[in-house]
Image (spheres, helix red, strand yellow):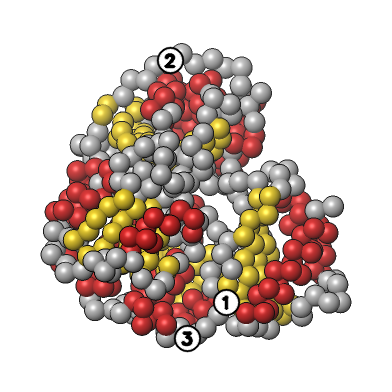
Amino acid sequence: MISKSIFREYDIRGIVGGELNEHTVKLIGYFLGVRIYERQSECCTPYVAVGYDARTHSPELFSYLASGLNASGCKVLNMGMVATGVNYFANFNTIDDFNVNATVMITGSHNPSEYNGFKITVNKKPFFGEDIYALGRTIIANQIKEIRFDDRHTTIDVKTPYINYIVNQFSHLKGLNHKFIIDCGNGVADTVLTEIFDKLELKYDGLYCEPDGTFPNHHPDPSDEHNLVDLKQELLKDEYEFAFAYDGDADRIAFLTKKYNVKGDIMAILFAKTMTKPTVIGEVKCSQIMYDIINTSGGKAIMYKTGHSNLKVKLVEEKADFACEVSGHIFFADRYFGYDDAIYATFRVLELIANGMDIDKEISNLPIVYSTEELKVKTTEEAKFVIIEKLKNILQNPPKDFPIIKDIIDVDGLRIVFENGWALVRASNTTPILVTRFESTDKQLVTLYEKKVNELIVLASK
C-alpha cells in the first residue's frame, strides 16, 4: 500500500526503500507528468527539468521518476546534482535552448539521510497543497498500474548560467575586503558557491564543502544550534568577521557574526532598511519586532503561513519585495525571481556589509525581547492537526490561571497574542511534530507562556 502521509503540504517526502520505492516513484513521475501536460496551453511536449541533492539514493530516484515522466509523454532534462535555487533558476531562464515547463528537485532537505522527496514547480508556480494531495489520491487509486523502467533524458547545464548570473549581478562585490567562513554541511551549496566566491575574488574559508549525502560531520540543518558548533569555533578566530551556513539543499541560510546568530526575521529588518517602503511577507514564527519596525518605518509587513510554497504564492499575490522565515528561507522578488535561494541570499548579506552596514550595531539597537528557538513537541501525523483543533476550542474558555489573551491569529496554527508577548503552536507540515515558539519583553513571561501553553497541549492531546 502507498502511504498518503508522503504527500505533504509543500512537497512529497518519505523514507527511501520504504515509502519511496521504485514502484511508488514511477507512479509519482507518471501522474505528475499527466498533470504537467494538462497545464500546458500549447499542444507541445512539456520539458521537465530534474535535479537532485547529495543523498546517496537521489540518482536512483531520478531514474525512477524519469521513467514515470517518460511514460506520461514528458521530456526529461537532467540537471544532475544542484542546489535547490539552481533548480528553480531553470524555470525563469532558457537553459541550453530549452524552455522549461516544470522542475522537480529531488531532495530530503534537512531530514535525516534515509529520507528523500520531491519539490515541484509547474509553469513557474509551486505545485503544493491541494495539488499534491489530489496527486496522492490519484496515485493511491491507481497503485496497481505498472510502469516500465525508462530513464531516458537529456543532460543540461544549469550551473554555468546560474554562476554567471550571480557573478554579473554582484560584480560590485569583487575584491570585498572582509574575510568570512562558510559551512556547507556536506550538502549541495558548493556545487556552485565557492566558484562564485572565486570569480568575485572574495576572501573566505570553507568547512564541509564536499557534497556527501551521508552527512559525516553534522546534520545539515543550520537552524539547530548543535550543527553550528564547529563553525562557531572557527568564527572565534581573529581572521574571520562573520560566517554563513547552509542546509542540505541550500535553500536555507544561517548568518552569524561574532556576536549574533542572525535569524531570518532579523535579516528581514536589515534588508528592509535598504529599501523604500518595502512590502515584506513574514511567517507566523517571526518576531513581533520585525512586523512593528517595518510597519512603523514606512513599509508594510504581512503575516502569513509558514512554508516555502505558501510564501512564494503570497509574495506574488501582494507584489511584495521579499519574504522570510525565521529558519532562513529568504525569498527575494526585488532584483530576483521570488524563490528561496540561500546562495543568492548570501550575496545580499555581503552587499549590506560592502555598503557599510554595521550588522552588530543595527541588531544591538533593536528593542530587547526574549524568545525561544523553535521548540518541537513529538506527536503523530494523524494527531497533530486534531490537537490544534482541540487547543483552539480550549482557548475559547481557557483556565483561570492562563495569561490574558488579547488576540488569536489562526492564519497558520495558533499565534496567541498576550499583552507583553505571544505564543505559537502549529502543526508541522513536513514532520509528525507540533512546533512552538514564545516571545516576550519580559524574560520570566517567556517561561510562563511556555509552561501554560504546554499544559494546554497536554490537555488537548488526551
- Amino acid bearing label 1: Tyr
Residue at mark 2: 149
Per the image, the residue denoted by label 1 is 370
Instruction: Measure how far apart labels 1 and 2 are at the Cα level.
Output: 55 Å
Question: Which disc is residue 296 wearing?
Answer: 3
At x 61% / y 21%, what residue is drawn?
143
Q: Position of residue 228 (x, y in %)?
A: 43, 57
Between the residue at mark 1 and the residue at mark 3, the CA separation in whole angstroms equals 21 Å
Of the image marks 1 and 3, the number of the one nearer the N terminus? 3
Q: Can you tell which mark lies on residue 249? A: none
Task: Identify which amino acid the numbered label 2 is placed on.
Answer: Phe
Between circles 1 and 2, the one closer to the viewer is 1
User: For residue 391, which quarter of the picture?
Assistant: bottom right
Above or below, comparing residue 435 to residue 242 in the picture: above
Q: Residues within 10 Å of mark 2 (few under 14, many from 20)?
A: some
- Spatial CA distance of label 2 from label 3 is 58 Å
Residue 205, given in percent of the width and then of the height, sits at: 24, 55
- Sequence-wise first label, 2 or 3: 2
Q: Residue at x 49, y 16 (%)?
A: 147
Left or right placement of residue 248 versus residue 154 in this view: right
- Which circle, 1 or 3, is nearer the viewer? 1
Location of residue 180 by image quarter:
bottom left
Q: Nearer the viewer, residue 159 or 228?
A: 228
Q: Is residue 16 visible?
A: yes
